[in-house]
């Protein structure tokens, strides 16, 4: 059984053994991918147009737009449910503490300060490498613990640039 949590409120139990069920109710549905990338879905005799807006594999989240209404669906697989029942729900998430240089380069700009709270996706640092500017972004919400480099300095591959907590 998979749990689907819609918009952080409604929870549905979905089984796909021999027939698809949602909260123990059998669901009759079909879907076809359209040339536009959208999906035409027929469920229990009603027609819907759906579009996948975003998939976040690390958080098992899918953002859908169905008939012009947006839905955020978080999927909980059986292993996630087991871990939650044991009180270790976040044991499978990756915790990134350091931002390291993936290649030698020149630090052009540090975009954060020590003690600053950052959100997943926030730009943190710009590194010039192989004549290209690379913007490093936060992999998760964190606090900048320490900045180990200065602007306009060269760094080596694997060197720790910023420590996060």
Image: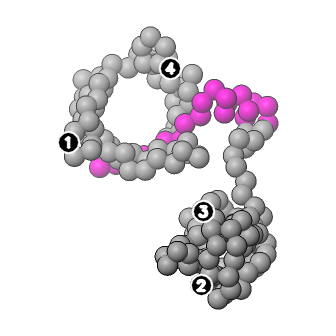
Farthest residue, direction left: 35
Residue 130 drawn in magenta = no
Mark 4, other Cα within 10 Å: few <14 / some 14–19 / many ≥20: some
- Residue 104 visible, this orientation: yes
State how far apart marks 1 and 3 are (Cα): 33 Å
State how far apart marks 1 and 4 are (Cα): 29 Å
**Residue drawn at the location 52% of the way across and 74% of the way down:** 130
Question: Which region is colored magenta?
Answer: 68-87
Identify the residue position indicated by label 4 in the image: 15
State how far apart marks 2 and 1 are (Cα): 43 Å
Return the disc, 1 or 3, that comes first in the chain's sequence: 1
Q: Secondary structure at mark 3?
A: loop
Return the disc, 3 or 4, that comes first in the chain's sequence: 4
Indicate which label's residue lies in the foreground, 2 or 1. Answer: 2
Q: In the displayed structure, does residue 15 sit left or right of residue 35? A: right
**Residue drawn at the location 33% of the way across and 19% of the way down:** 28
Image coordinates of residue 38 in percent, x first then y, are 27, 43
Q: Nearer the viewer, residue 84 or 136?
A: 136
- The quarter of the picture where residue 92 lies is top right
Mark 1, other Cα within 10 Å: few <14 / some 14–19 / many ≥20: few
Image coordinates of residue 19 in percent, x first then y, are 42, 13
Identify the residue position indicated by label 2 in the image: 108
Residue 35, which numbered label?
1
Identify the residue position indicated by label 3 in the image: 120
Q: Secondary structure at mark 2?
A: strand
- The quarter of the picture where residue 102 lies is bottom right
């Amino acid at each position: 059984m998979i749990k689907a949590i819609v918009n952080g409120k409604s929870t549905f139990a979905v089984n796909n053994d021999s027939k698809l069920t949602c909260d123990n109710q059998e669901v009759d549905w079909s879907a076809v991918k359209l040339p536009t990338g959208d999906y035409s879905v027929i469920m229990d005799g009603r027609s819907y147009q759906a579009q996948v807006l975003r998939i976040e594999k690390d958080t098992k989240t899918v953002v859908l737009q169905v008939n012009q209404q947006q839905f955020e669906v978080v999927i909980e697989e059986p292993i996630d449910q087991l871990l939650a029942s044991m009180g270790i729900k976040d044991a499978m998430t990756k915790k990134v503490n350091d931002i390291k240089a993936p290649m030698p380069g020149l630090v052009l700009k540090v975009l954060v300060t020590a003690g600053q709270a950052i959100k997943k996706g926030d730009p943190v640092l710009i590194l010039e490498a192989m004549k290209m500017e690379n913007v490093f972004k936060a992999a998760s919400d964190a606090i900048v613990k320490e900045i180990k480099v200065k602007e306009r300095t060269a760094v080596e591959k694997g060197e720790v640039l910023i420590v996060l907590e």
